[in-house]
Amino acid sequence: MASNTTPLWLFDLDNTLHNASHAIFPAINTNMNRIIQRVLENDGQPSDEAAVNYLRRHYWKLYGATLLGLVRHHGMDIDEFLHEAHLFDDLPGMVRAERGIGRWLQQLPGRKILLTNAPRRYSRELVRHLGLHRHFSHHISIESMHVHRQLRPKPSRLMLRKLLARHKIAPRRCILVEDTVDNLKSARELGVRTAWVTQYLRGSQALLGHMGGQRALSRLPGFVDVKVRSVRQLPRRLAALGALR
């Protein structure tokens, strides 16, 4: 039986457990741009490349997920968007990840939950391809992130609070491992401990059009307990996370 000090780990997937910036995120952005262009055309609005890129980034920054903006302002069907945005010719061939991830996860005490804003079919296929499915007691994808019948993906505090209540665990015993600082900040506001994975961020920042990426990566935000390049460093940082065996 787990002790009352055993941590619960919440692991993000893309750009945390693998390098999504290499090929997967560019493909998703291309698919999303196609969807947004169609939505803008149907609304009779400008649908050139600049307008599409602006709307994708604007909704991502405003809501934490482009999908939420499309649902709220354009009546986008959630399942249609998730399916079309994650269509790939060869997903296994696009994956880039470090060797030994499963071994590092095994060294972390406590249960582990996969918590991803990606859709279920994509994330399950990817986790199985990486050979990591056996390490997670639960797999929470974006389809499961509803609160009061409203979609509430990360960085929603409502969703995270509901998750902690369901698993009957205090926030201080929970550790979120993420690449996205907005998600980490939101978790910390609830009292969850945080680990920031940074090695794949330069590629994702370029895709999102972030400025000052190098400066951002050099800082340690106050809401981050531990900053690591790779998940492989987490077993050596257990003390800093309050997660000693």
Image (cartoon, grey):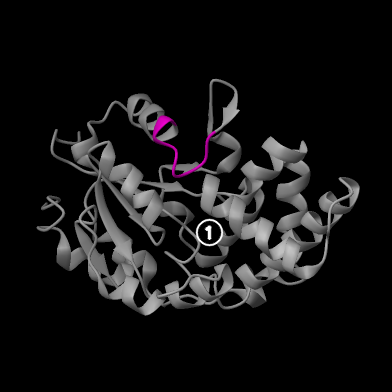
How far across and how far down the image is residue 188, in percent?
Answer: 26, 44
- 82 relative to 73, above or below: below
Q: Is residue 87 left or right of residue 138?
A: right
Residue 5 location in percent, x, y? 13, 38
Q: Amino acid at mark 1?
A: Val
Q: Quadrant of residue 225?
A: bottom left
For mark 1, does the 10 Å Cα neighbourhood hold few (<14), some (14 to 19), or many (20 or more) residues? some
**Residue 185 versus residue 79: which sits nearer the camera?**
185
User: Principal SS element in the magenta part?
Assistant: loop
Instruction: Please state if 185 lies on the left or on the right of 241 as rendered.
Output: right
- At 49% from the left edge and 63% from the top edge, which residue is drawn? 131
Horizontal side of residue 28 vs 126, given as left or right? right
Q: Residue 217: where, in percent of width, then height?
A: 32, 73
Which residue is rendered at x = 74% and y = 62% of the image? 51
Magenta stretch: residue 126 in it?
Answer: no
Give the image location of residue 36, x and y in percent.
77, 55
| Residue under numbered circle 1 | 127
Q: Which residues are magenta?
A: 152-158
Residue at 38 percent across and 75 percent down: it is 199
Q: Where 162 sits versus 51, above or below?
A: above
Nearest the viewer among 93 and 25 is: 25
Which residue is at 73% across, 59% downward?
32
